[in-house]
Image: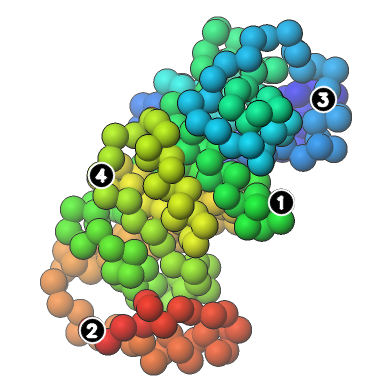
């Protein structure tokens, strides 16, 4: 099968374009990766190039040895993915050590995978282990309302989790484990990847202060939906704070406990503190 005809490729392109249309990917902002299923690789194997050089990832992800990923390219614009996937995306293979990759398809003008490849792969590794292989997507977006909140809320997991849960009743059901927050760091390397992947052991969402969000999920719909839910909740909080610094009423800690019972989700008490 032609690579572009594969269903996962079409789903990836649609998700990237939806993010562009929602204003999350100015210029070359953001990146997306998908851990391709073995059966999916089989259908396109004859169109993969295995003669390209092995290159350093910049970190080690030994649990991902031999895996294939579809990733966005460094410096590429999400806006252009739908027009020219073969120049903006790549399928990469990870070597036996989990320290190198090679480009098997795409990035046809000598491009490189996303500058956040270390964060993507270290997050994938943590999530693959924690979910027994179910998690396949890591998505990084520059979602403006979440970024705005990182200038006015304390950069604490419990504050971001609680404040965003409060802004829409469905939030604690969509991300019951909460949200992790990384204080400002230099992006694009191993250091921020280590800190982010540590948070991904506990959460599906990690916020990079003054930069953006990482979301992890099992499939395209749920991962995009998670990003959308978090950003929409942040938008409601920005609107609310813009009207008034004080809420007249809100969802209370006890309301969350009642919701948890009814929806059969576990909401950690660490987020249900009295304010
Ligand atoms: O430019 O979003 O974090 C891509 C990025 C880097
Ligand atoms: Zn970014």
Who comes first in sequence, dot 1 or dot 2?
Answer: 1
| Rendered residue at 66%/58% (across/down) | 131
Q: Residues within 10 Å of mark 2 (few under 14, many from 20)?
A: few
Q: Earlier in the sequence, mark 2 or mark 3?
A: 3
Disc 4, SS: loop
Indicate the position of residue 74 as horizontal and vertical percent values: 46, 22
According to the image, label 3 marks what residue?
44
The answer to which quarter of the image holds residue 16 is: top right
Q: CA distance from mark 2 to mark 3?
A: 54 Å
Q: Which badge, 3 or 1, is on the more N-terminal residue? A: 3
Q: Secondary structure at mark 1?
A: loop
**Relative height, residue 254 to residue 30 (above, below):** below
**SS label for mark 2:** loop
Question: Which residue is at the front of the view, 191 or 181?
Answer: 191
First in residue order: circle 4 vs circle 2:
4
Spatial separation of the CA atoms under disc 4 and disc 1: 30 Å
Question: Nearer the viewer's eye, disc 1 or disc 2?
Answer: 1
Residue 32 location (% of width, % of height)? 53, 37
Q: Which residue is mark 1?
A: 133
Residue wearing tag 2 = 275
Closer to the N terminus: mark 4 or mark 3?
Answer: 3
- Is 84 rendered above or below residue 79? above
User: Which of the 4 quarters of the picture holds residue 4?
Assistant: top right
Image: 111 above or below 27 = above
Q: Nearer the viewer, mark 3 or mark 1?
A: 1
Res 70 visible? no
Residue receiving disc 4:
184
Residue lying furthest left: 245
The x and y percentages for residue 184 are 25, 44
| In-image side of 260 versus 130 (left or right) | left
User: Marks 3/1: CA distance?
Assistant: 21 Å
Gap between marks 4 and 2, in whole Å?
A: 26 Å
């Amino acid at each position: 099968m032609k690579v572009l005809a594969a269903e996962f490729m079409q789903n990836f392109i649609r998700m990237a374009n939806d993010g562009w249309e929602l204003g999350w990917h100015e210029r070359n902002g953001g990146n997306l990766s998908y851990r391709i299923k073995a059966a999916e690789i089989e259908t396109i194997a004859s169109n993969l190039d295995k003669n390209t050089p092995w290159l350093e990832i910049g970190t080690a992800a030994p649990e991902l040895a031999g895996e294939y990923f579809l990733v966005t390219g460094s410096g590429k614009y999400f806006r252009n993915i739908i027009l020219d996937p073969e120049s903006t995306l790549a399928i990469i293979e990870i070597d036996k050590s989990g320290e190198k990759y090679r480009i098997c398809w795409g990035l046809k003008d000598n491009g490189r995978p996303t500058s956040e490849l270390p964060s993507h792969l270290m997050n994938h590794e943590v999530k693959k282990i924690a979910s027994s292989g179910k998690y396949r997507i890591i998505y990084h977006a520059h979602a403006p309302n979440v970024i705005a909140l990182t200038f006015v809320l304390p950069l604490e997991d419990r504050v971001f989790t609680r404040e965003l849960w409060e802004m829409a009743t469905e939030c604690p059901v969509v991300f019951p484990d909460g949200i992790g927050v990384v204080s400002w760091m230099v992006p694009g390397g191993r250091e921020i990847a280590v800190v982010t992947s540590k948070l991904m052991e506990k959460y599906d969402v990690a916020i990079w202060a003054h930069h953006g969000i990482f979301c992890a999920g099992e499939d395209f719909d749920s991962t995009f939906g998670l990003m959308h839910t978090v950003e929409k909740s942040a938008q409601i909080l920005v609107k609310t704070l813009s009207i008034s610094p004080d809420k007249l009423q809100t969802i209370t800690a006890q309301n969350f406990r009642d919701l948890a019972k009814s929806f059969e989700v576990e909401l950690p008490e660490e987020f249900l503190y009295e304010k």
